[in-house]
Image (cartoon, helix red, strand yellow):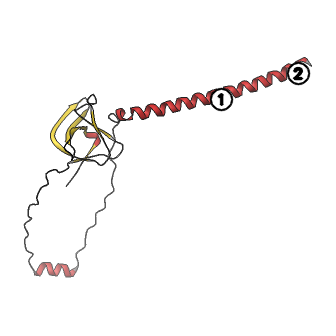
Amino acid sequence: MIDQELSARLRQRSRQSGIWLGLAMGLAIFIALAGFIWLYGRLAPVFSDFVSRLPEATPTSVVTPEATPVAAVRAASSPTPVVTPQPSPTPAWQATHRVAQGSQVNFRSGPGTQYQVVAVLEPGTELRFLGEQEQVGNATWLHLELPDGRDGWIRTVDLELIRR
């Protein structure tokens, strides 16, 4: 009888210990996950300078118009006047690059991650190249200007060239 009573108490203790151990492990996992999320949120602007993004491929389709017999006859019978294009007035500020799609990018006061962040730019923000670039480590940094006149530096891997 003593053995059965002792055995029942040991099983009950074992169940209680298992429950407490499970709760403690769940709490530890929750704390670790919350800490990681908090730390990632705090350090994301710093790490965004080191994570390279590949440009997204955009599908293009080419449509070729087919010549109709009427258009061919008109083209052969009447000479087309030569039109000389008039130069369009150039705006004072014209964008040459834009921030690549993905996440926000740090716009820095100098060519490197050790320089102060002037602004955090959203993807698609247009910039103008000021003609200066610098190689720092494995990254090439471009000196750029925002439409509001502020200038700063961004890595080339974070930019897209605007083709006009």
Given residues 121 and 61, the one toward you in this image is: 121
Lower sequence index among marks 1 and 2: 2
- Where disc 1 sits, the SS reads helix
Quick check: marks 1 and 2 in contact, CB under 8 Å? no
The nearer-to-camera label among 1 and 2 is 1
Q: Residue at x 75, y 24 (%)?
A: 14
Q: Quadrant of residue 42?
A: top left
> Closest to the observer: 115 or 134?
115
Count of numbered tags: 2
As drawn, 3 above or below 68: above
Q: Quarter-wise, where is residue 158 in the image?
A: top left
In the picture, which quadrant includes the N terminus? top right
Per the rendering, the mark at residue 23 is: 1
x and y, in percent, of residue 157 in the image: 28, 40
Residue 144 place in picture, x, y as percent: 20, 41
Q: Note whether 106 is above or below 7 in the view shown.
A: below
> On the image, numbered disc 2 is attached to which residue?
4
Residue 88 appears left or right of 45: left
Image side of residue 16 versus residue 149, left or right: right
Query: Local crowd at mark 1 within 10 Å, few (<14), some, or many (≥20)?
Result: few
